[in-house]
Image (tube, grey):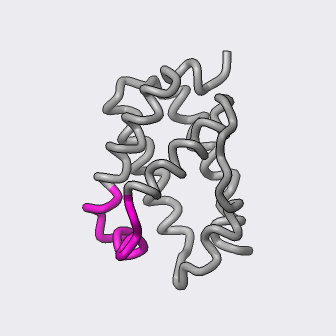
Amino acid sequence: MSLYEKLGGDAAVDAAVDIFYRKVLMDDRINQYFDGVDMAGQSQKQKAFLTMVLGGPNSYTGKDMREGHKHLTGLNDTHVDAVIELLGETLKELGVGDEDIGEVAALANSVRDDVLNR
């Protein structure tokens, strides 16, 4: 069973992304990177991306992690850490178990160097 299925499929991904971005926009460590961003469009892209990386149907047509983040100046490990932390909090709120949260965090961490363009 894929992580996508274990987490609850489309409904779970949709709920997680919505809650996650509410947290992101309230977090002073990272919210400045979303100034002027079309959050409805961003959420749709994120839902498609997470569905794909969690093992669900692949309908993601966006940029890869390196290309999608290279324009963000000043991005560093503390920002990636904040994203992983907020994602974990979101999943915990949705009743996801620690082992599955750890798997999601490992997936997020696996693209750290691409996100940070190093």
Residue 26 counted in the magenta span:
yes
Question: In the rendered image, which quarter contains the N terminus?
Answer: top right
Which residue is located at x 64 percent, y 66 percent?
115
Q: Residue at x 54, y 76 (%)?
A: 75
Q: Quadrant of the C terminus?
A: bottom right
Closer to the camera in the image, 103 or 26: 26
Q: Position of residue 64 (x, y in %)?
A: 71, 60
Please provide percent x and percent y for residue 16: 40, 38
Q: Please give the name of the residue rendered at 44% of the width and 51% of the height, measured from the top-left corner.
A: 43
**Depth order, front residue of 42/118:** 42
Horizontal and vertical percent position of residue 20: 37, 47
| Closer to the camera in the image, 91 or 78 | 91
Q: Residue furthest top?
A: 1
| Stretch of the chain drawn in magenta | 24-39
Outermost residue, bottom side: 73
Residue in the image at 42% along x and 43% along y: 17
The picture places residue 70, in percent across and down from the top left corner, at 64, 77
As displayed, is residue 38 above or below residue 44? below
Q: Is residue 22 above or below residue 50?
A: below
